[in-house]
Amino acid sequence: MTGRWVIYGATGYTGQLLASRSLARGLSPLLAGRDGARLRRLAEPLGFEHRAARLDDPAALARLLRGARLVLNAAGPFAGTAGPLVAACLATGAHYLDVTGEPAVFAALRRRSGLARQRGVMLLPGVGFVVVATDCLAAHVARRLPGAVRLRLGVSLPASYAGRGSLRTAARHLSPGVRVRHGGRLAVPPFPLEHDFDYGWGRRTGLAVDWADVVTAYYTTGIPDIEVYLDLQPAERAALLAGRLFAGWLRSPPGQALLRAKARTMPEGPPPADRRRAGCAVVAEGEDHDGRRARARLHTPDQYTFTAAAALSLVERVLAGELAAGFQTPARVYGADFVLGLDGVTREDLAG
Ligand SMILES: NC(=O)c1ccc[n+]([C@@H]2O[C@H](COP(=O)([O-])OP(=O)(O)OC[C@H]3O[C@@H](n4cnc5c(N)ncnc54)[C@H](OP(=O)(O)O)[C@@H]3O)[C@@H](O)[C@H]2O)c1
């Protein structure tokens, strides 16, 4: 496998994990970001090249990506970082991958699909836990029930586990309502939706959330009605509902300052021992016009371990020339069973 490739945002929690796991897999990324000193401290012990390039400097980004096969963007919130990197990819012909989970970023990249196809560039956002796990399970259920018209996805993550980068990202996208897909269009139901899922440790009631699959699973499966639910502890649920109630104020400058201050008090991410103990579950339920159902469940390692494994496995596939130009979703290009090739992932079909 040859070709220069770049991890942008390598100094973050996820970026560092991607860098160290790259070494373990025999991959040699160039580590990039905006802070040259931090990049040097990270890259030198790993024996990787490194280079600083700011996102507000298109010429520096073009120099960074010229001759590169792909960039894997780990710099979030991606609403602020995907645009300049995608522009540099379209200018240089490098493929674009990222670990975003932000629905608006998927929608924005999808709008650039035509130009990307013309330039032979693949835009593949969401190569982490979000959306690889849900996208592959959605594709599996759609394959089992080809006439499905409704898809419900349930996601159970380790409690109080996400790091400060994820809080900063969530803070950028606070909204009073939750988007679902209804009749192929995005819609905001007037009240909170709930649904029960069996994650293998008893049934749990999930709350509908704004999640990227309302964009990506529609693109992958064509199912017109899609909802995504999160399994929440009581305190997390209360915080989420309060965040929706006060979304207007929290989006204002003082609200954003408060959330940034809160993020600074959080750990950058879980320590490795916690990662080894934790795991995630995803359930997908499809239903057709006649009420026939197909259900399946996925168990995975924790979302950061999964993200590193999925992202680097997809990097290897792209470097090997397996790709499709334009905006893509992981399961559309690499299939519903891609996820089964990742360590610690199991899938089971459930009785309807
Ligand atoms: N898809 C998934 O399942 C999944 C899994 C894990 C994480 N994520 C997402 O990945 C993102 C990163 O998470 P994290 O925990 O690694 O966060 P983090 O530790 O805060 O790291 C963020 C990284 O982004 C860089 N960055 C942010 N804004 C930038 C800008 N304008 N220009 C250049 N660099 C910029 C930071 O650079 P500095 O060091 O210079 O500040 C840092 O390297 C978050 O959005 C998170 O939600 C998604």
Image (cartoon, helix red, strand yellow):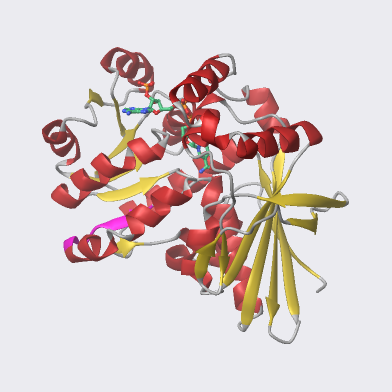
Residue 230 location in percent, x, y? 69, 48
Q: Residue at x 77, y 31 (%)?
A: 235
Residue 84 seen from this side? yes
Q: Quadrant of the C terminus?
A: bottom right
Instruction: Pinpoint residue 308: horizontal percent, then vertical percent.
Output: 50, 39
Residue 143's place in the image compared with 12, above or below, is below
Looking at the image, residue 241 sits to the left or right of residue 319; the answer is right
Give the mark count. 0
Q: Is residue 62 above or below residue 15?
A: below
> What residue is rendered at 30% in x and 18% in y?
35
Q: Residue at x 60, y 33 (%)?
A: 246
Q: Is residue 120 magenta?
A: yes
Hey, which residue is sitting farthest bottom in the picture?
A: 290
Residue 76 coordinates in the image, percent (x, y): 42, 34
- The residues colored magenta run 119-124
Residue at 47% over, 51% down: 103
Looking at the image, residue 122 sits to the left or right of residue 233; the answer is: left
User: Quarter of the image holding residue 190?
Assistant: bottom right
